[in-house]
Amino acid sequence: MKLVIINYGAGNIKSIQFAFKRLGVDAILSNDPKEIETADKVIFPGVGEASSAMKMLKESGLDKLIPKLQQPVLGICLGMQLMCLHTEEGDTEGLGIFQTKVKRFSDAVKVPQMGWNVIKDLKSDLFQGIKENEYMYLVHSYYAEHCDETIAATDYQINYASALQHENFYGTQFHPEKSGAIGSKILENFLKL
Amino acid sequence: MLTKRIIPCLDIKNGRTVKGVNFVDLRDAGDPVVLAKQYAEQGADELVFLDIAATLENRGTTLDMVLRVAEQVNIPFTVGGGITSVAHVDALLKNGADKVSINSSAVKRPELINELADKFGSQCVVVAIDAKEVEGEWYVHLAGGTIPTDIKLFEWAKEVEERGAGEILFTSMNHDGTKAGFANEALATLSNLLNIPIIASGGAGNVQHFVDTFREGKSDAALAASVFHFGEIPIPELKKELKKQDIEVRI
């Protein structure tokens, strides 16, 4: 199993690498297109600000490469948001893999949403063996609106898409690598796809 | 629904846990990794590691500890103590810390908050504020609460939010160590004034104190040290009681 975590300068990728290591898989950190293309599975992480993350993707040409990948790809947090059409954060065009837009939570709630919230209405192999309403760890100020590609929903101010899937592309707003044993099970499911 | 968070705080010196910890069945209670794993298994929602003797010389030791925690613990954790620069935060995050907590350095140079939020995102910037109420007015204190300033708590908290902090960890010096409950009035004022999460710290003595700080103090999370370390309040029982009292928690 060749697992590559795309390393484009965004965020805490060590946690993701360690989470897979606990599952017995040594992930490679790389931004080399050849490494990414030849991987069996690809993780697209992202923490930080959307427009600067997108800029880093463009500088390395990864914005063109990622949408063409054929193997299972999992975007996490900002990674998932960047796979959408557009995000209000920095008015940033996304990779357009998921046909939905990313908006900011209103100030009716505390922003960022920070902590553990449940995921429900699960529908994907990614959630094989995961019960409804399990708690996941989330930290985000922007959310993806529901679309046909929604595979999990969460409530915070509104009901939004906390996971998305389009063909071989998966995205989770929550951090499975930081969500205890259940999160770990989701990563294990991803490895089995 | 987003749950209220329970956060044990571990004091670290030279990569080891310092405060006496009284867990049963632990091979090495001084090893932060062993303790962190234990807390994660008990249902802690996050962990805070506070390097209480942080110096330039022992920075490497702390970084190494962070790496070992990240390797073995599957819940989020924050690292604080002696953080003064973007480069230092970069190293901590690269070693697997999810968030960093800054305190005195933010008061001395508030631009640090902007710099960290711009570079790493607000979500990983916790600003810790120690304050003391003197004649009806709350004042910010530095260096673990030992040095008073004339900075007013609520004004500073507002500035901290505007500069891009993702969260505030508020410790009341009047309540810390008393085990008589959290500073719920000040916490509620903070929570109403700001639109970022507030972590209550200082004063936890019994289960009801946690109920009160979530209900009256409107806190988003509660942090404590000794009541957890000495097993006075086991986290599973705490969470069960919170749930019984209709406070949303992760069980």
Image: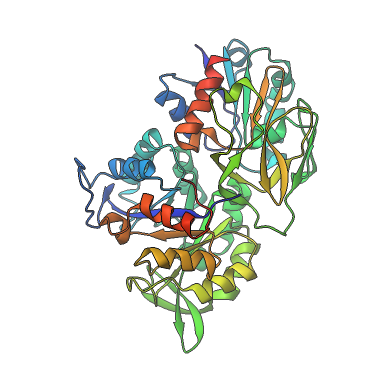
Query: Is B177 or B209 nearer to us in this picture?
Result: B209
Camera-nearest residue between B207 and B47 = B207
Occupied quadrant, residue A181: top left
Q: Taking B211 as reference, is A47 above or below it? A: above
- Does A98 sit above or below residue B177? above
Give above or below for B97 relative to A55.
below
> Residue A8: x, y in percent?
60, 30
Q: Residue at x 58, y 38 (%)?
A: A133
Left or right: where B156 falls relative to A50? left
Q: Residue reaching furthest bottom?
A: B135
* Circle count: 0
Residue A21 position, x and y percent, is: 42, 24
Q: Position of residue B59 (x, y in %)?
A: 35, 48
Q: What residue is shown at x 33% (from left), y 42% (from top)? A: B65
Q: Looking at the picture, does residue A27 appear above or below residue B193?
A: above
Q: Is residue A46 left or right of residue A184?
A: right
Q: Nearer the viewer, residue B58 or B170?
A: B170
Residue B50 visible, this angle: no
Q: Residue at x 59, y 31 (%)?
A: A45
The percent position of residue B116, horizontal first and vertical second, equals 57, 52
| Snapshot quadrant of residue B19 | bottom left
Q: Residue at 73% across / 20% down in the picture?
A: A67
Give the side of residue A175 with respect to residue B241, left or right. Answer: right
Q: Nearer the viewer, residue B201 or A83?
A: B201
Please say which color scheme the image uses: rainbow
Residue B77 lies left or right of residue A78; in this view the side is left
Q: Is residue B221 visible?
A: yes
